[in-house]
């Protein structure tokens, strides 16, 4: 639905076309990916975008062809599926409804659309997807194999945190190499590997690593399921002899007791399941599968802990182990072991290595001990190049802070964590960890000397030291900049925390825990979605929650749930409600209704769990507004009663579930959740609302903001509650008191209610707790506490909510109320404070949405880009006497003026606007409740 305001909008369709516009179909995607391989969905979702050289482009119908041979598609034959002409504007998440798909098969597809004039456009360029293994039999008897089987009595599932018992301490395991040789005797058409190596694996073929992934596969609840990864390896094979080689690391599958660990767990020793499919040009096939015929031996990685570090002994390398012709007579046969019962395709983007940080400063600490400052706190791994004697050991200690005496400081995030590298003594050696990453800015290196420095002890010589940033490879799809330098630095501060904590789950931090704390996915998720394509990763998080849900219906605070924490750290509605909120947000942002179907049982079971725990419809358990600013060191809520946040989330869950039930045509359920929600709302207001002061509970920023955002406030009191929110901010010297839970809702309410001026005042200073103070203290990534405390994590993204406002408020890009996947767009920039320019773009599912504005003393200028097949409502700050110029043409301001804005609707295209003699920029008026609720 288009946005309705109770007054007549100026319907402004710009018709400046002077020639017939050519509409094309582009950016074809299957399951959110371009030409993906390893798709295991039986009805994959197909999407495309429209483009053209004119305005107001839209789709009125489409036709999809799918074929199993490209030549058929060239002849416009869809032997697998021909959707025929479908009258619909939908171009997202179109479910494949053709013949049953076959495993390990390439399918080619293309799309034709009809435009707004019912004119058929040219066929798109073809795209393709390659199916994964669709059922258990498709593994062709591939077995789980390893170096040895973990005895059942040593299995630790769930993991433990209270591991004071010495039996948990010294539990080093073998990190094995596995290999298999085979011979190609016929011309090869295609070779594909389907592989899962737990906890993490590196696959090699004929002496070279396959692909550029890091820490494959994504982390899961391994006693329930694991993920396999698909690689096209055709180009790496050769006629005749070939060799497959796999190195295995521990990851979360096996967490040793040595060194620092947040938890100690053991699903099993490292293990492998693999199928290589060989498809020959003559149409025949062969399979190379993991079984007891593979050979195995200990590898040069002698210690691997996802928490504690990694050791590599280069003297144990076996040259050629991953190449044909290697003598493995001394290797043992692989052992067939038990493995996860279900394997699913890894649909999310993998982790990869991105930025390379060179040292900005190198300091000598002591003889043979040097400190390297890489300038940026980020998730990553160290990388060294070194020359020295065989058997010499270099120790690398990473940290995000340094102590008062200049040494690396791990006290706030757990220690000891370090890497050991043992030299083989052959020229210049280069090494980097393979199965562990950390969050660090500094590297303290012991037992070596930088090249060119005095070296009386003849220690190994470091010829290069740098940091390699690792993160999920989700593409960047958003851009933002503005004239305010502090805001630009804040954007970068938040962005580095997002990059550092977007792995195969959304982690809290890249060092201390690396766990998937669920509140971040829904609270900071919108900030991330503006900036990165995390659709597939969000789908993985949903499945992690489904696997984590208990028989009682509880969705714990973390997923995958490797360890059972106590009390609020396992059962907090602000965290567990992600089970209801995230699927709905995925639907709203990406138009993916299938996630609602998949999640519905989890959602209803979780809400039933909350209902059972409630007392007269009120909840009171959990962590509350985590890390708010009160008199004590931050932690559990200090300013807001836990009953407020817990019950508000419960009501929000019920509101969402009623909508989802309606979308899925479950009308009886919808009525049930509406009625239950109304009962919760009445109980909430009776318990917490003071209708004489218009305050909720303690009157904190969080208590009032959540009540407004969740629409718990009686309409006649809403304006007064909002004024109380503003007053509280002003009383705290324009400072923040809300924490992890409340701050996102505080921003959303202020933005929706036209009070971006307050958001500006809260975040444009460095002398109160907040982003500016963290930057003033030297932070290069967002910290865990508003105050930037040293004794908390200094790379946390749970407070990164302001990035959403940079896009939705300052630049003004937001969805219209009721819009799905930004089909109906609002452009409503907020020129506040001293900001004279803001520019942002967001690659929505329909295409790029752009907003770029500048403000001068007498003129406001705006450039807008609206993608094809969408509509937009544009709000220009104006007075009733302003001159409005659109694409060079003067328009009548009276036709669309309302409460300090000139409002118009339009279709797709690129537009320029000028408002001459605008009122002061901080005179923002009117309210807007359209950002995603």
Image (cartoon, grey):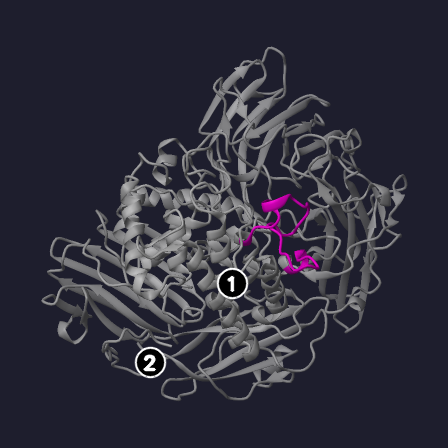
Say left or right for 12 vs 632: left
User: What is the distance, in whole Å, between disc 1 and disc 2 at their CAs?
Assistant: 45 Å
Please, is residue 99 above or below residue 617 in the view?
Answer: below
Q: Is residue 723 visible?
A: yes
Residue 571 drawn above or below residue 864: above
Instruction: Determine whether label 1 and label 2 are within 8 Å by CB.
Output: no
Q: Dot 2: within a 10 Å radius of its alpha carbon, few (fewer than 14), some, or many (20 or more) residues? A: some
Of the residues tagged 1 and 2, which is closer to the observer?
Answer: 1
Q: Quadrant of residue 721?
A: bottom left
Is 567 one of the magenta-colored residues? Answer: yes
Query: Would residue 543 be found to the left or right of residue 275 on screen?
Result: left
Q: Which residues are magenta?
A: 546-573
Q: Can you identify the residue that label 1 sits on?
A: 653
Q: Nearer the viewer, residue 108 or 755?
A: 755
- In the picture, residue 326 is in which quadrant? top right
Residue occupying the far top of the picture? 456
Residue 602 lies, with reference to residue 645, above or below; the image says below
On the image, numbered disc 2 is attached to which residue?
21
Instruction: Name the element at disc 1.
Output: helix
Q: Secondary structure at mark 2?
A: loop
Q: Residues within 10 Å of mark 1 (few under 14, many from 20)?
A: many
Residue 505 belongs to magenta span: no
Question: Majority secondary structure of the magenta segment?
Answer: loop
Question: Which residue does the image show at 49% across and 17% down from the upper left?
Answer: 405
Q: Which mark is residue 394?
A: none
Q: Quadrant of the N terminus?
A: bottom left
Q: In front here: 647 or 501?
A: 647
């Amino acid at each position: 639905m288009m946005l309705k305001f109770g007054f007549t909008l100026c319907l402004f369709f710009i018709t400046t076309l002077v020639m017939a516009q050519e509409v094309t179909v582009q950016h074809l995607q299957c399951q959110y990916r371009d030409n993906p391989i390893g798709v295991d969905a039986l009805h994959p979702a197909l999407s495309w975008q429209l483009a053209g050289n004119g305005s107001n482009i839209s789709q009125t119908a489409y036709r999809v062809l799918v074929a199993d041979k490209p030549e058929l598609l060239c002849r416009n034959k869809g032997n697998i599926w021909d959707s025929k002409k479908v009258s619909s504007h939908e171009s997202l998440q179109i479910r494949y409804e053709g013949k049953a798909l076959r495993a390990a098969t390439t399918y080619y597809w293309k799309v034709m659309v009809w435009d707004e004039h019912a004119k058929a456009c040219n066929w798109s360029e073809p795209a393709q997807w390659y199916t994964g293994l669709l059922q258990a039999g498709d593994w062709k008897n591939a077995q789980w194999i390893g170096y040895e089987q973990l005895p059942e009595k040593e299995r630790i599932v769930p993991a433990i945190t209270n591991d004071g018992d010495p039996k948990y301490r010294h539990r080093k395991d073998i990190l094995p190499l596995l290999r298999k040789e085979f011979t190609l005797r016929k011309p090869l058409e295609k070779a594909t590997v389907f592989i899962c190596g737990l906890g993490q694996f590196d696959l090699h073929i004929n002496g070279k690593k396959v692909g550029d992934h890091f820490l494959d596969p994504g982390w899961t609840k391994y006693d329930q399921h694991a993920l396999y990864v698909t690689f096209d390896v055709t180009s790496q094979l050769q006629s005749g002899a070939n060799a497959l080689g796999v190195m295995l690391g521990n990851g979360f599958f096996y967490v040793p007791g040595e060194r620092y660990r947040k938890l100690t767990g053991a699903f099993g020793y490292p293990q492998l399941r693999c199928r290589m499919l060989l498809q020959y040009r003559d149409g025949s096939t062969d399979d190379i599968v993991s079984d007891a015929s593979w050979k195995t031996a200990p590898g040069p990685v002698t210690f691997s802990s996802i928490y504690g570090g990694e050791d590599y002994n280069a003297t144990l390398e076996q040259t050629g182990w991953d190449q044909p012709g290697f003598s493995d007579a001394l290797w043992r046969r692989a052992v067939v072991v038990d493995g996860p019962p279900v394997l699913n395709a890894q649909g999310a983007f993998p982790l990869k290595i991105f930025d390379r940080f060179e040292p900005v400063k190198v300091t000598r600490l002591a003889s043979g001990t040097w400190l390297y400052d890489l300038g940026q706190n980020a998730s990553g791994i160290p990388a060294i190049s070194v020359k020295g004697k065989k058997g010499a050991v270099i120790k690398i200690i990473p940290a995000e802070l340094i102590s008062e005496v200049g040494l690396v400081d791990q006290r706030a995030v757990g220690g000891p964590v370090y890497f050991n590298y043992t030299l083989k003594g052959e020229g210049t050696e280069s090494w980097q960890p393979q199965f562990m990453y950390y969050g660090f800015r500094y590297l303290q290196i012991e037992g070596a000397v930088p090249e060119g420095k005095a070296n009386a002890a003849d220690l190994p010589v470091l010829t290069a030291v740098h940091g390699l940033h690792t993160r999920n490879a989700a593409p960047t799809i958003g851009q933002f900049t503005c004239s305010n330098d502090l805001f630009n630095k804040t954007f970068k501060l938040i962005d580095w925390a997002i990059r550092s904590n977007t792995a195969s789950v959304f982690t809290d931090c890249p060092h201390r825990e690396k766990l998937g704390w669920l509140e971040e996915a829904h609270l900071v998720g919108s900030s991330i979605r503006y900036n990165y394509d995390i659709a597939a990763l969000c789908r993985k998080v949903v499945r992690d929650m489904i696997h984590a849900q208990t028989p009682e219906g509880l969705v714990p605070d973390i997923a995958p749930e490797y360890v059972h924490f106590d009390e609020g750290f396992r059962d907090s509605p602000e965290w567990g409600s992600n089970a209801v909120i995230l699927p709905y947000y995925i639907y709203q942002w990406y138009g993916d209704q299938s996630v609602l179907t998949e999640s519905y049982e989890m959602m209803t079971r979780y809400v039933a769990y909350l209902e059972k725990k409630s007392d007269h419809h009120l909840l009171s358990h959990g962590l509350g507004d985590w890390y708010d600013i009160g008199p004590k060191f931050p932690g559990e809520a200090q300013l807001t009663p836990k009953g407020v946040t817990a019950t508000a989330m419960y009501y929000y869950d019920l509101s969402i579930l009623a909508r989802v039930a309606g979308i899925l045509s479950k009308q009886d359920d919808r009525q049930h959740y509406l009625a239950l929600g109304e009962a919760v709302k009445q109980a909430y207001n009776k318990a917490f609302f003071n209708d004489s002061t218009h305050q909720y509970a303690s009157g904190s920023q969080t208590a009032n903001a959540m009540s407004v955002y969740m629409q718990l406030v009686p309409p006649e009191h809403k304006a007064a509650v909002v004024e109380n929110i503003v007053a509280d901010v002003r009383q705290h010297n324009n400072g923040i008191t809300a924490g992890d839970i409340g701050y996102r809702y505080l921003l959303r309410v202020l933005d929706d209610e036209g009070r971006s001026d307050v958001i500006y005042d809260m975040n444009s200073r460095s002398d109160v707790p907040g982003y500016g103070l963290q930057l003033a203290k030297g932070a290069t990534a967002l910290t865990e506490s508003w105050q930037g405390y040293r004794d908390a994590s200094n790379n946390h993204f749970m407070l990164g909510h302001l990035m959403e406002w940079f896009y939705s408020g300052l630049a003004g890009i937001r969805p219209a109320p009721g819009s799905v996947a930004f089909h109906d767009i609002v452009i409503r920039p907020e020129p506040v404070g001293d900001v004279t320019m803001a520019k942002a773009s967001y690659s929505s599912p329909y295409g790029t949405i752009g907003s770029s504005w500048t403000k001068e003393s007498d003129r406001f200028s705006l450039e807008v880009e609206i993608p094809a097949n969408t509509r937009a409502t544009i709000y220009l700050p104006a007075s009733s006497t302003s001159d409005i110029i659109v694409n060079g043409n003067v328009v009548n301001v009276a036709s669309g003026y309302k409460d300090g804005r000139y409002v118009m609707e339009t279709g797709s295209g690129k537009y320029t606007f000028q408002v001459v003699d605008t009122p002061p920029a901080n005179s923002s008026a009117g309210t807007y409740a359209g950002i995603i609720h």
